[in-house]
């Protein structure tokens, strides 16, 4: 009996060893600064935005004028919503001639992301029009939260 316990204990200890060090290729795109805006392409619709990691987003403004969050309640995010938002931004850019920049931060295990807009490119009236259009576009999508004047979650 003691020998069996010792064997099980030894197996348990060997299972707790850290895995051998392996080389992992980084799959996320390199982080860019706000001055060097990159294009994020989604299903053919092109918008101007940045994908940030937590450290870079923490260096952004204290408050974002608009945050569009793609959330999940256990079954993943709405697969149509990001493309709808991207298409809306592209159409708005084409209509006004002003490129809308945003920071996109993935934060969840099921594809949850925040798209954070300062909307500095737009006047107060244009901002209201832009937000109204996003609310209208996302009206039937329960897994999308739209918050105005949201504090930067990562700002300390």
Image (cartoon, rainbow, N blue to C red):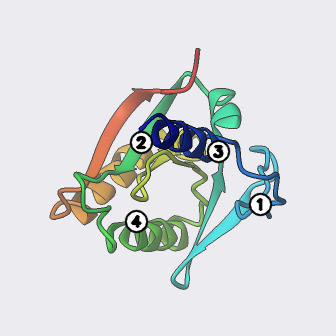
Q: Secondary structure at mark 3?
A: helix
- Decide: marks 1, 2 in contact (CB < 8 A)? no
Q: In the image, 24: left or right of 122?
A: right
Question: Which-is-in-front pick, marks 2 and 3?
Answer: 3
Q: Secondary structure at mark 1?
A: loop
Pointer 3 or 4: first along the chain: 3
Residue 14 is situated, as x and y percent measured from the top left of the image, at: 64, 44
**Residue 38 x/y as whole percent:** 74, 61
Question: Which residue is label 3 attached to?
Answer: 14
Secondary structure state at the residue bearing disc 2: strand
* Residue beneath the point at 55% across and 85% down: 44
The residue labelled by disc 1 is: 26
Q: Nearer the viewer, residue 69 or 28?
A: 28
Q: Is residue 21 left or right of residue 1?
A: right
Circle 2 residue? 67
Q: Earlier in the sequence, mark 4 or mark 2?
A: 2
Give the spatial CA distance, label 1 vs label 4.
Answer: 27 Å
Q: Nearer the viewer, mark 1 or mark 4?
A: 1
Q: Which residue corresponds to mark 4?
A: 85
Dots 1 and 4: beta carbons under 8 Å? no
């Amino acid at each position: 009996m003691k020998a069996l316990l010792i064997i099980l204990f030894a197996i348990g200890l060997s299972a707790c060893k850290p895995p051998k060090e392996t080389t992992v290729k980084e799959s996320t795109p390199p982080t860019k600064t706000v001055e060097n805006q990159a294009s994020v392409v989604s299903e053919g619709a092109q918008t101007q935005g940045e994908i940030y990691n937590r450290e870079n987003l923490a260096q952004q403004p204290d408050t974002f004028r608009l945050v569009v969050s793609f959330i999940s309640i256990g079954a993943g995010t709405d697969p149509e919503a990001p493309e709808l938002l991207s298409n809306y931004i592209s159409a708005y850019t084409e209509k006004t001639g002003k490129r809308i920049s945003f920071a996109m931060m993935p934060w969840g295990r099921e594809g949850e992301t925040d798209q954070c807009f300062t909307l500095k490119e737009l006047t107060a009236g244009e901002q209201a029009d832009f937000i109204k259009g996003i609310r209208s576009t996302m009206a039937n999508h329960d897994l999308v939260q739209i918050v105005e004047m949201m504090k930067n979650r990562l700002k300390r």
